[in-house]
Image: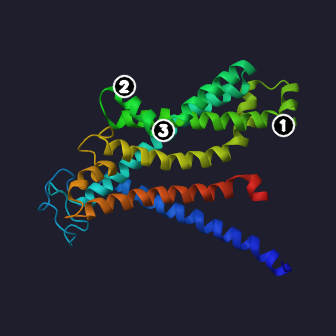
Amino acid sequence: MTAIDQITTPARRRSWQSVTLWAGIILVSLHVIVGLLTLVWTPYDPSAMAGGRLEAPSWLHWVGTDRLGRDFLTQIMIGSRIALTVGIGAVAIGAAIGVTLGLLAAFASKFLDDALAAALDILIAFPTLLIAMLVVAASETATLGSAILALGIALSAIVARLTRILAKRVLLMDYITAARTSGTSWLGIVFSHVLPNIWPTLSVSFALQFGLAAIAEASLSYLGLGAPPPNASWGRLLQEAQGTVYTAPIGAIAPGIALVSLVIGINLLADGLRDSIDPTRRAR
């Protein structure tokens, strides 16, 4: 490799990382803007029959209408708000439970640490969607809140295991020994040393789990265990469109594209954050 290549290769890599980060920010921001917009305005009343059944896309209905004559663009926009709500809620619950359990395991005795690690491994062995389905089924009534709680609990095991591994690695550092010797409390060590050092990696994990939560919520709604009508979840729209996929394929294509674009945006954002926030990767 020539000297010029050695100089330009890192620059190209940084440029590509910047493109990845901004592409993710743009895609996610579009969904956030649409979701917030539905709080104050939608093209049509979500529950009103604004046209004929299964109309093709037109100037009046840009994405056509569904089998009940409702404007499909309005349903897609509301689905974006629901996906964001579920993603934020599930990640917040998963982070609160997972980080707490992970820190407790890292600071616990060897016996308790091994017991918690084994329990987390067992939970992680079960698919996230299966755990969420069991929690929703146990609540007896499928609501948006039960879906958020179920996904948060399902994701917490992944967060707890990652937090435990990262925290135990930090606790082996010399500055932690110095902090203990100086009389710093365990709580002070957690907030002053442990959390600041593990937060970059956790942030990337949270972003990835946001996309996982969006997919899982769509799966639950497709199975009838997610947000009930009149909540226009993308999964429910896909379920309703499967009977008319040959006569009105836009009903299946539009929510699928919306879901894929959100997940791709989240993954690109997580990839960009990993390279820009994590100081060890940035140094390399």
Indicate the position of residue 6 as horizontal and vertical percent values: 82, 75
Q: Secondary structure at mark 3?
A: helix
Label drawn at residue 173: 1
User: Upstream in the sequence, badge 1 or badge 2?
Assistant: 2
Q: Is residue 73 left or right of residue 118?
A: left
Q: Is residue 205 left or right of residue 32?
A: right
**Residue 135 image-quadrant placement:** top left
Residue 27, compared with residue 189, is above or below; it is below
Q: Is residue 220 left or right of residue 271?
A: left
Residue 176, compared with residue 68, is above or below; it is above
Name the residue: 33% across, 49% down: 235
Q: Which residue is mark 3?
A: 128
Label 3 near label 1: C-beta < 8 Å? no
Q: Residues within 10 Å of mark 2 (few under 14, many from 20)?
A: few
Amino acid identity at mark 2:
Ala
Amino acid identity at mark 1:
Met
Q: Secondary structure at mark 1?
A: loop
Q: Nearer the viewer, residue 193 or 132?
A: 132
Q: Secondary structure at mark 2?
A: helix
Q: Which residue is mark 2?
A: 138
Q: Nearer the viewer, residue 278 or 130?
A: 130
